[in-house]
Image: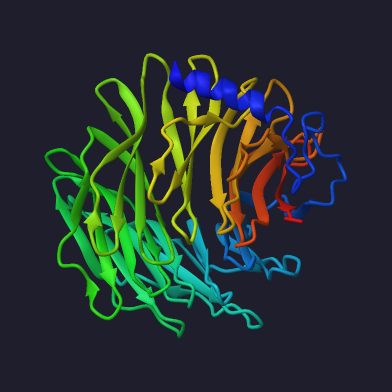
Amino acid sequence: MQIRNTLIAALVILAGTVLAACGQHSDDPVPVVNDPSLFSIATGTNITGYTQLAMNSKGDALVSWRQSNGSEEIVHAAYTTATGAFGNNSALSDNSSILQRTAVSENGDAFVVWEDDAGGIIGIGSNHYSPGAAWDGVVSVDTHTAGNVIEPWVATSPTGTAFAIWRQYGGGVNEVWASWRGPGPGWSTPELLTRVTGGFAADPTVAVDTAGNAVAAWVEFQNGYTVRAKRYQAGSGWDPSSTLIGAPADPFEPKIGMDKDGNTTVIWNYADNGNHGVQMNRYAVGSGWSGTETIIERADSVGFIFDPQLAVAADGTAVLAWEQSDGSKYDIWADHYTPGTGWTKYPVMVSDGTEDSQSPHVAISASGRALAAWRQIPSQNMSIRGAWYQADTGWGLPRRLSAAGDQGWPQYVNAAMDSSGNALIVWDAYYSDTQSVTIWGYRITTP
Protein backbone atom coordinates (compact mmCIF):
# COMPACT_ATOMS: atom_id res chain seq x y z
CA MET A 1 0.00 0.00 0.00
CA GLN A 2 2.86 2.36 0.79
CA ILE A 3 4.37 1.79 -2.67
CA ARG A 4 0.99 2.38 -4.31
CA ASN A 5 0.40 5.64 -2.42
CA THR A 6 3.88 6.85 -3.28
CA LEU A 7 3.28 6.06 -6.95
CA ILE A 8 -0.05 7.93 -6.98
CA ALA A 9 1.52 10.97 -5.35
CA ALA A 10 4.41 10.90 -7.80
CA LEU A 11 2.06 10.74 -10.78
CA VAL A 12 0.05 13.69 -9.50
CA ILE A 13 3.14 15.78 -8.95
CA LEU A 14 4.64 14.86 -12.30
CA ALA A 15 1.50 15.11 -14.39
CA GLY A 16 2.47 18.53 -15.64
CA THR A 17 6.22 18.03 -15.63
CA VAL A 18 8.00 19.47 -18.62
CA LEU A 19 11.01 17.52 -19.81
CA ALA A 20 12.72 20.54 -21.27
CA ALA A 21 15.61 18.60 -22.71
CA CYS A 22 13.22 16.45 -24.69
CA GLY A 23 10.53 18.98 -25.50
CA GLN A 24 7.96 16.67 -23.87
CA HIS A 25 4.91 17.63 -21.85
CA SER A 26 1.62 16.03 -20.98
CA ASP A 27 -0.09 16.82 -24.30
CA ASP A 28 2.92 15.98 -26.50
CA PRO A 29 3.31 12.18 -26.12
CA VAL A 30 4.41 11.43 -29.70
CA PRO A 31 7.13 13.03 -31.84
CA VAL A 32 6.20 13.90 -35.40
CA VAL A 33 7.24 11.44 -38.08
CA ASN A 34 10.07 13.65 -39.31
CA ASP A 35 11.44 14.28 -35.81
CA PRO A 36 15.09 15.27 -36.46
CA SER A 37 16.16 13.37 -33.34
CA LEU A 38 15.17 10.07 -35.01
CA PHE A 39 17.56 8.65 -37.62
CA SER A 40 18.50 5.43 -39.38
CA ILE A 41 21.93 3.88 -38.78
CA ALA A 42 21.60 0.96 -41.20
CA THR A 43 18.86 -0.84 -43.12
CA GLY A 44 18.67 -3.92 -45.33
CA THR A 45 17.12 -7.30 -45.97
CA ASN A 46 20.34 -8.98 -44.84
CA ILE A 47 20.38 -7.39 -41.35
CA THR A 48 19.21 -9.81 -38.65
CA GLY A 49 19.45 -7.53 -35.61
CA TYR A 50 20.69 -8.19 -32.06
CA THR A 51 21.71 -4.54 -31.82
CA GLN A 52 24.19 -3.49 -29.11
CA LEU A 53 25.31 0.02 -28.08
CA ALA A 54 28.27 1.37 -26.13
CA MET A 55 29.11 5.05 -25.50
CA ASN A 56 31.71 6.88 -23.43
CA SER A 57 31.19 9.99 -21.29
CA LYS A 58 32.18 12.27 -24.19
CA GLY A 59 29.51 10.82 -26.49
CA ASP A 60 31.67 8.67 -28.80
CA ALA A 61 29.48 5.66 -29.62
CA LEU A 62 29.59 2.27 -31.30
CA VAL A 63 26.57 0.31 -32.51
CA SER A 64 26.99 -3.35 -33.50
CA TRP A 65 24.57 -5.89 -34.97
CA ARG A 66 24.39 -9.16 -36.88
CA GLN A 67 24.13 -9.24 -40.66
CA SER A 68 24.10 -12.03 -43.22
CA ASN A 69 26.82 -12.24 -45.87
CA GLY A 70 24.75 -14.72 -47.86
CA SER A 71 25.94 -17.88 -46.16
CA GLU A 72 26.29 -17.01 -42.46
CA GLU A 73 25.67 -14.23 -39.96
CA ILE A 74 28.62 -12.03 -39.06
CA VAL A 75 29.10 -8.97 -36.84
CA HIS A 76 28.81 -5.48 -38.31
CA ALA A 77 29.26 -2.11 -36.62
CA ALA A 78 29.11 1.65 -37.14
CA TYR A 79 31.04 4.23 -35.08
CA THR A 80 30.53 7.92 -34.39
CA THR A 81 32.36 10.60 -32.46
CA ALA A 82 30.38 12.85 -30.13
CA THR A 83 30.10 15.56 -32.79
CA GLY A 84 29.70 13.40 -35.90
CA ALA A 85 27.34 10.98 -37.61
CA PHE A 86 27.59 7.20 -37.68
CA GLY A 87 30.16 6.10 -40.22
CA ASN A 88 30.23 3.27 -42.69
CA ASN A 89 28.74 -0.12 -41.97
CA SER A 90 31.86 -2.25 -41.31
CA ALA A 91 32.06 -6.05 -41.24
CA LEU A 92 34.04 -7.11 -38.14
CA SER A 93 34.03 -10.92 -38.12
CA ASP A 94 34.97 -13.64 -40.62
CA ASN A 95 32.96 -16.63 -39.38
CA SER A 96 29.44 -17.26 -38.16
CA SER A 97 29.15 -14.93 -35.16
CA ILE A 98 26.54 -14.40 -32.48
CA LEU A 99 26.03 -12.71 -29.10
CA GLN A 100 28.40 -9.80 -29.68
CA ARG A 101 29.19 -7.29 -26.90
CA THR A 102 30.64 -3.81 -27.20
CA ALA A 103 32.60 -1.25 -25.15
CA VAL A 104 34.05 2.23 -25.82
CA SER A 105 36.81 3.86 -23.74
CA GLU A 106 37.18 7.56 -22.93
CA ASN A 107 39.83 7.97 -25.63
CA GLY A 108 37.37 6.59 -28.19
CA ASP A 109 38.84 3.10 -28.58
CA ALA A 110 36.07 0.60 -29.36
CA PHE A 111 36.06 -3.12 -28.60
CA VAL A 112 33.71 -5.84 -29.83
CA VAL A 113 33.75 -9.51 -28.75
CA TRP A 114 31.50 -12.31 -29.93
CA GLU A 115 30.91 -16.06 -30.06
CA ASP A 116 32.88 -17.15 -33.11
CA ASP A 117 32.05 -20.43 -34.85
CA ALA A 118 35.11 -21.38 -36.88
CA GLY A 119 33.64 -24.75 -37.81
CA GLY A 120 32.74 -27.06 -34.97
CA ILE A 121 34.34 -25.36 -31.97
CA ILE A 122 32.97 -22.05 -30.74
CA GLY A 123 35.53 -19.53 -29.50
CA ILE A 124 35.67 -15.82 -28.68
CA GLY A 125 36.56 -13.47 -31.53
CA SER A 126 37.31 -9.77 -31.15
CA ASN A 127 38.00 -6.61 -33.10
CA HIS A 128 39.32 -3.21 -32.06
CA TYR A 129 38.90 0.29 -33.50
CA SER A 130 40.90 3.46 -32.82
CA PRO A 131 39.47 6.83 -33.91
CA GLY A 132 40.93 7.89 -37.23
CA ALA A 133 42.18 4.39 -38.04
CA ALA A 134 40.70 1.23 -39.50
CA TRP A 135 39.49 -1.79 -37.56
CA ASP A 136 42.45 -3.98 -36.55
CA GLY A 137 40.98 -7.24 -37.84
CA VAL A 138 39.77 -10.38 -36.11
CA VAL A 139 41.80 -11.56 -33.09
CA SER A 140 40.98 -14.64 -31.02
CA VAL A 141 40.65 -13.95 -27.30
CA ASP A 142 40.53 -17.52 -25.99
CA THR A 143 43.07 -20.29 -26.59
CA HIS A 144 40.98 -23.42 -25.93
CA THR A 145 41.12 -26.46 -28.20
CA ALA A 146 38.18 -28.49 -26.84
CA GLY A 147 34.65 -27.76 -25.69
CA ASN A 148 32.78 -24.55 -26.47
CA VAL A 149 33.12 -20.96 -25.35
CA ILE A 150 29.95 -18.87 -24.97
CA GLU A 151 28.45 -15.84 -23.21
CA PRO A 152 31.21 -13.28 -23.78
CA TRP A 153 31.25 -9.85 -22.15
CA VAL A 154 33.63 -6.91 -22.55
CA ALA A 155 34.29 -3.73 -20.59
CA THR A 156 36.99 -1.06 -20.77
CA SER A 157 38.65 1.50 -18.54
CA PRO A 158 38.74 5.18 -19.58
CA THR A 159 42.32 4.74 -20.79
CA GLY A 160 41.53 1.75 -23.01
CA THR A 161 42.39 -1.27 -20.86
CA ALA A 162 39.75 -3.80 -21.87
CA PHE A 163 38.64 -6.97 -20.09
CA ALA A 164 36.85 -9.86 -21.79
CA ILE A 165 35.11 -12.60 -19.82
CA TRP A 166 33.35 -15.75 -21.01
CA ARG A 167 31.97 -19.15 -20.08
CA GLN A 168 33.61 -22.37 -21.28
CA TYR A 169 32.09 -25.83 -21.00
CA GLY A 170 32.69 -29.43 -22.06
CA GLY A 171 33.10 -32.89 -20.53
CA GLY A 172 30.88 -32.11 -17.55
CA VAL A 173 33.02 -29.11 -16.54
CA ASN A 174 31.92 -25.46 -16.58
CA GLU A 175 34.45 -22.64 -16.27
CA VAL A 176 34.67 -18.85 -16.35
CA TRP A 177 37.75 -17.34 -18.00
CA ALA A 178 39.01 -13.81 -18.50
CA SER A 179 41.61 -11.94 -20.54
CA TRP A 180 42.67 -8.31 -20.78
CA ARG A 181 44.49 -6.05 -23.20
CA GLY A 182 46.08 -2.66 -22.70
CA PRO A 183 45.86 0.27 -25.09
CA GLY A 184 48.32 -1.61 -27.29
CA PRO A 185 47.58 -4.72 -29.41
CA GLY A 186 46.98 -8.25 -28.21
CA TRP A 187 45.04 -10.00 -25.47
CA SER A 188 46.70 -11.49 -22.39
CA THR A 189 46.90 -15.22 -21.81
CA PRO A 190 43.43 -16.24 -20.55
CA GLU A 191 43.12 -16.85 -16.82
CA LEU A 192 40.74 -19.25 -15.11
CA LEU A 193 38.39 -17.54 -12.63
CA THR A 194 36.35 -20.57 -11.57
CA ARG A 195 35.86 -24.25 -12.42
CA VAL A 196 32.69 -26.19 -11.55
CA THR A 197 32.45 -29.97 -12.01
CA GLY A 198 29.03 -31.57 -11.93
CA GLY A 199 27.27 -28.20 -11.90
CA PHE A 200 27.63 -25.04 -13.93
CA ALA A 201 28.96 -21.49 -14.00
CA ALA A 202 27.03 -19.04 -16.19
CA ASP A 203 26.10 -15.44 -16.99
CA PRO A 204 29.56 -13.88 -16.51
CA THR A 205 29.93 -10.10 -16.58
CA VAL A 206 32.70 -7.59 -15.80
CA ALA A 207 33.31 -3.89 -15.12
CA VAL A 208 36.51 -1.77 -15.03
CA ASP A 209 37.37 1.46 -13.15
CA THR A 210 39.58 4.41 -14.11
CA ALA A 211 42.72 2.78 -12.66
CA GLY A 212 42.28 -0.48 -14.58
CA ASN A 213 40.93 -2.49 -11.63
CA ALA A 214 38.13 -4.88 -12.55
CA VAL A 215 35.39 -6.91 -10.91
CA ALA A 216 33.85 -10.00 -12.53
CA ALA A 217 30.60 -11.64 -11.40
CA TRP A 218 28.75 -14.81 -12.40
CA VAL A 219 26.23 -17.43 -11.22
CA GLU A 220 27.35 -20.87 -10.00
CA PHE A 221 25.44 -24.03 -9.22
CA GLN A 222 27.12 -26.72 -7.16
CA ASN A 223 25.11 -28.06 -4.23
CA GLY A 224 22.97 -24.93 -4.47
CA TYR A 225 22.97 -21.63 -6.33
CA THR A 226 25.34 -18.76 -5.57
CA VAL A 227 26.35 -15.44 -7.09
CA ARG A 228 30.11 -15.04 -6.97
CA ALA A 229 32.58 -12.24 -7.73
CA LYS A 230 36.33 -11.89 -8.17
CA ARG A 231 38.44 -8.72 -8.23
CA TYR A 232 41.38 -7.84 -10.47
CA GLN A 233 43.87 -5.32 -9.08
CA ALA A 234 46.00 -3.48 -11.61
CA GLY A 235 49.61 -4.49 -11.15
CA SER A 236 48.92 -7.64 -9.13
CA GLY A 237 46.21 -9.56 -11.02
CA TRP A 238 43.11 -11.53 -10.03
CA ASP A 239 42.41 -12.37 -6.39
CA PRO A 240 43.24 -16.03 -5.64
CA SER A 241 39.63 -16.95 -4.84
CA SER A 242 36.14 -15.70 -5.59
CA THR A 243 33.75 -14.21 -3.03
CA LEU A 244 30.21 -15.44 -2.44
CA ILE A 245 28.08 -12.31 -2.70
CA GLY A 246 24.59 -13.85 -2.83
CA ALA A 247 22.86 -17.21 -2.32
CA PRO A 248 19.16 -17.05 -3.28
CA ALA A 249 17.35 -20.20 -4.40
CA ASP A 250 17.57 -19.42 -8.12
CA PRO A 251 19.62 -16.36 -9.23
CA PHE A 252 20.18 -15.45 -12.85
CA GLU A 253 21.72 -12.84 -15.14
CA PRO A 254 23.74 -10.63 -12.77
CA LYS A 255 24.43 -7.07 -13.92
CA ILE A 256 27.40 -5.01 -12.77
CA GLY A 257 28.23 -1.31 -12.54
CA MET A 258 31.26 0.54 -11.21
CA ASP A 259 31.97 4.17 -10.33
CA LYS A 260 35.20 5.99 -11.14
CA ASP A 261 36.83 4.93 -7.85
CA GLY A 262 36.10 1.23 -8.22
CA ASN A 263 33.09 0.99 -5.89
CA THR A 264 31.01 -1.75 -7.49
CA THR A 265 27.34 -2.71 -7.51
CA VAL A 266 26.20 -6.17 -8.61
CA ILE A 267 22.47 -6.90 -8.96
CA TRP A 268 20.68 -10.08 -9.97
CA ASN A 269 17.18 -11.36 -10.58
CA TYR A 270 16.05 -14.30 -8.46
CA ALA A 271 13.21 -16.72 -7.81
CA ASP A 272 12.84 -17.98 -4.25
CA ASN A 273 9.99 -19.81 -2.49
CA GLY A 274 7.20 -18.43 -4.65
CA ASN A 275 8.70 -14.93 -5.00
CA HIS A 276 10.59 -13.04 -7.69
CA GLY A 277 12.79 -10.07 -6.95
CA VAL A 278 16.04 -8.17 -7.36
CA GLN A 279 18.94 -8.36 -4.94
CA MET A 280 22.31 -6.63 -4.81
CA ASN A 281 25.68 -6.59 -3.12
CA ARG A 282 28.03 -3.60 -3.17
CA TYR A 283 31.82 -3.54 -2.96
CA ALA A 284 33.27 -0.40 -1.36
CA VAL A 285 36.97 0.27 -1.85
CA GLY A 286 38.70 -0.08 1.50
CA SER A 287 35.91 -1.97 3.26
CA GLY A 288 34.85 -4.82 0.94
CA TRP A 289 31.44 -6.32 0.19
CA SER A 290 28.51 -4.97 2.19
CA GLY A 291 26.29 -8.07 2.13
CA THR A 292 23.23 -9.17 0.18
CA GLU A 293 20.37 -6.67 0.10
CA THR A 294 16.90 -7.13 -1.39
CA ILE A 295 15.80 -4.12 -3.46
CA ILE A 296 12.36 -5.35 -4.53
CA GLU A 297 10.44 -8.61 -4.06
CA ARG A 298 6.93 -9.70 -5.04
CA ALA A 299 4.97 -12.90 -4.69
CA ASP A 300 4.54 -14.80 -7.95
CA SER A 301 0.80 -14.88 -7.27
CA VAL A 302 0.78 -11.07 -7.66
CA GLY A 303 3.12 -10.87 -10.66
CA PHE A 304 6.66 -11.60 -11.77
CA ILE A 305 9.70 -9.34 -11.63
CA PHE A 306 12.40 -9.96 -14.21
CA ASP A 307 14.93 -8.50 -16.66
CA PRO A 308 16.45 -5.94 -14.24
CA GLN A 309 18.88 -3.46 -15.82
CA LEU A 310 21.50 -1.40 -13.95
CA ALA A 311 23.46 1.76 -14.74
CA VAL A 312 26.01 3.39 -12.40
CA ALA A 313 27.36 6.95 -12.81
CA ALA A 314 30.94 8.06 -12.15
CA ASP A 315 29.97 9.43 -8.73
CA GLY A 316 28.25 6.19 -7.68
CA THR A 317 24.62 7.20 -8.17
CA ALA A 318 22.69 4.42 -9.89
CA VAL A 319 19.40 3.61 -11.56
CA LEU A 320 17.64 0.27 -11.79
CA ALA A 321 14.72 -0.63 -14.06
CA TRP A 322 12.86 -3.89 -14.49
CA GLU A 323 9.83 -5.52 -16.09
CA GLN A 324 6.98 -6.28 -13.68
CA SER A 325 3.69 -8.10 -14.20
CA ASP A 326 0.44 -7.06 -12.52
CA GLY A 327 -1.26 -10.28 -13.55
CA SER A 328 -2.69 -8.96 -16.83
CA LYS A 329 0.12 -6.95 -18.45
CA TYR A 330 3.74 -5.95 -18.00
CA ASP A 331 4.98 -2.53 -16.86
CA ILE A 332 8.41 -0.93 -16.42
CA TRP A 333 9.35 0.09 -12.88
CA ALA A 334 12.47 1.86 -11.60
CA ASP A 335 14.37 2.76 -8.46
CA HIS A 336 17.25 5.14 -7.77
CA TYR A 337 20.40 4.78 -5.64
CA THR A 338 22.22 7.63 -3.88
CA PRO A 339 25.65 7.02 -2.26
CA GLY A 340 25.38 7.26 1.50
CA THR A 341 21.59 6.87 1.38
CA GLY A 342 20.96 3.75 -0.68
CA TRP A 343 18.00 2.66 -2.79
CA THR A 344 14.72 4.45 -2.16
CA LYS A 345 12.89 1.09 -1.92
CA TYR A 346 9.82 2.98 -3.21
CA PRO A 347 9.92 2.16 -6.93
CA VAL A 348 8.00 4.16 -9.52
CA MET A 349 6.20 2.82 -12.57
CA VAL A 350 7.76 4.72 -15.47
CA SER A 351 5.68 3.23 -18.30
CA ASP A 352 2.14 4.53 -18.71
CA GLY A 353 0.40 1.40 -17.42
CA THR A 354 -1.96 1.09 -20.38
CA GLU A 355 -0.27 -1.60 -22.48
CA ASP A 356 2.40 -4.29 -22.24
CA SER A 357 5.88 -2.79 -21.80
CA GLN A 358 8.98 -4.98 -22.10
CA SER A 359 12.77 -5.16 -22.42
CA PRO A 360 13.92 -2.12 -20.42
CA HIS A 361 17.37 -0.58 -20.69
CA VAL A 362 18.80 2.22 -18.54
CA ALA A 363 21.51 4.86 -18.60
CA ILE A 364 22.72 7.50 -16.15
CA SER A 365 25.02 10.52 -16.43
CA ALA A 366 27.42 12.30 -14.09
CA SER A 367 24.98 15.23 -14.09
CA GLY A 368 22.39 13.11 -12.27
CA ARG A 369 20.08 12.65 -15.22
CA ALA A 370 18.89 9.11 -15.97
CA LEU A 371 16.91 7.42 -18.72
CA ALA A 372 14.83 4.27 -19.04
CA ALA A 373 13.85 3.02 -22.51
CA TRP A 374 11.71 0.03 -23.48
CA ARG A 375 9.38 -1.34 -26.13
CA GLN A 376 5.62 -1.04 -25.75
CA ILE A 377 3.24 -3.56 -27.29
CA PRO A 378 -0.28 -2.32 -27.99
CA SER A 379 -2.82 -4.12 -30.17
CA GLN A 380 -1.31 -2.31 -33.18
CA ASN A 381 2.02 -0.66 -33.97
CA MET A 382 4.58 -1.49 -31.29
CA SER A 383 6.76 1.42 -30.27
CA ILE A 384 9.88 2.44 -28.38
CA ARG A 385 9.22 4.59 -25.31
CA GLY A 386 11.45 6.47 -22.90
CA ALA A 387 11.19 8.28 -19.56
CA TRP A 388 13.72 10.63 -17.97
CA TYR A 389 14.80 11.14 -14.39
CA GLN A 390 15.99 14.44 -12.94
CA ALA A 391 17.40 14.53 -9.41
CA ASP A 392 15.22 17.49 -8.44
CA THR A 393 11.91 16.37 -10.00
CA GLY A 394 12.07 12.57 -10.24
CA TRP A 395 10.70 10.58 -13.17
CA GLY A 396 8.88 12.39 -15.97
CA LEU A 397 6.11 11.15 -18.22
CA PRO A 398 6.97 8.50 -20.84
CA ARG A 399 7.48 9.64 -24.42
CA ARG A 400 7.29 7.78 -27.70
CA LEU A 401 10.62 7.70 -29.53
CA SER A 402 9.87 5.63 -32.61
CA ALA A 403 7.90 7.34 -35.37
CA ALA A 404 4.12 7.54 -35.15
CA GLY A 405 2.58 4.88 -37.39
CA ASP A 406 5.82 2.89 -37.63
CA GLN A 407 4.83 -0.66 -38.66
CA GLY A 408 8.07 -2.29 -37.52
CA TRP A 409 8.58 -4.94 -34.84
CA PRO A 410 11.16 -3.28 -32.51
CA GLN A 411 13.52 -5.18 -30.24
CA TYR A 412 16.96 -5.02 -28.56
CA VAL A 413 16.52 -1.60 -27.01
CA ASN A 414 19.75 0.08 -25.85
CA ALA A 415 20.28 3.37 -24.01
CA ALA A 416 23.42 5.36 -23.16
CA MET A 417 24.30 8.83 -21.84
CA ASP A 418 27.34 11.07 -21.88
CA SER A 419 28.55 13.01 -18.84
CA SER A 420 26.30 16.00 -19.65
CA GLY A 421 23.13 13.94 -19.89
CA ASN A 422 22.89 13.83 -23.68
CA ALA A 423 21.27 10.51 -24.54
CA LEU A 424 21.36 8.01 -27.39
CA ILE A 425 18.74 5.27 -27.72
CA VAL A 426 19.23 2.54 -30.33
CA TRP A 427 17.05 -0.39 -31.40
CA ASP A 428 16.36 -2.60 -34.42
CA ALA A 429 12.97 -3.08 -36.06
CA TYR A 430 11.77 -5.75 -38.49
CA TYR A 431 9.39 -4.76 -41.32
CA SER A 432 7.37 -7.65 -42.73
CA ASP A 433 6.25 -5.77 -45.85
CA THR A 434 9.84 -5.38 -47.09
CA GLN A 435 11.33 -8.27 -45.07
CA SER A 436 14.04 -5.90 -43.91
CA VAL A 437 15.52 -4.66 -40.65
CA THR A 438 16.40 -1.07 -39.80
CA ILE A 439 18.76 -0.05 -37.00
CA TRP A 440 17.24 3.12 -35.53
CA GLY A 441 18.81 5.79 -33.33
CA TYR A 442 17.29 8.62 -31.32
CA ARG A 443 19.36 11.47 -29.86
CA ILE A 444 18.30 13.75 -27.02
CA THR A 445 20.52 16.78 -26.41
CA THR A 446 20.59 18.62 -23.10
CA PRO A 447 20.07 22.35 -23.72
- Give the quadrant of residue 413: top right
Q: Position of residue 392 (x, y in %)?
A: 61, 43
Is 78 on the left-hand or right-hand side of 161? right
Q: Position of residue 295 (x, y in %)?
A: 36, 35
Q: Quadrant of residue 419?
A: bottom right
Q: Where 19 sits versus 74, above or below?
A: above
Whether residue 411 can be seen here: yes
Q: Nearer the viewer, residue 173 or 378?
A: 378
Question: Which quadrant, please, contains the N terminus?
Answer: top left
Q: Looking at the image, which residue sits at the far bottom?
A: 184
Task: Classify 262 as above or below 308.
Answer: below
Residue drawn at x 74%, y 70% as measured from the top left: 83
- Foreground: 363 or 177? 363
| Residue at the image position 14 percent from the left and 43 percent from the top | 222
If the image is split into quadrants, where does the C terminus sit? bottom right
Compare residues 395 and 407 and report the one nearer the observer.
Answer: 395
Asked whether, in this view, residue 203 is left or right of residue 348, the answer is: left
Q: Residue at x 47, y 52 (%)?
A: 317
- Residue 438 placed where, x, y %? 72, 49
Q: Position of residue 336 (x, y in %)?
A: 48, 42
Residue at the spot x=49%, y=59% of the render? 101
Q: Identify the image quadrant of residue 104.
A: bottom right
Q: Is residue 179 left or right of residue 80?
A: left
Q: Seen in the image, is 392 located left or right of residue 222?
A: right
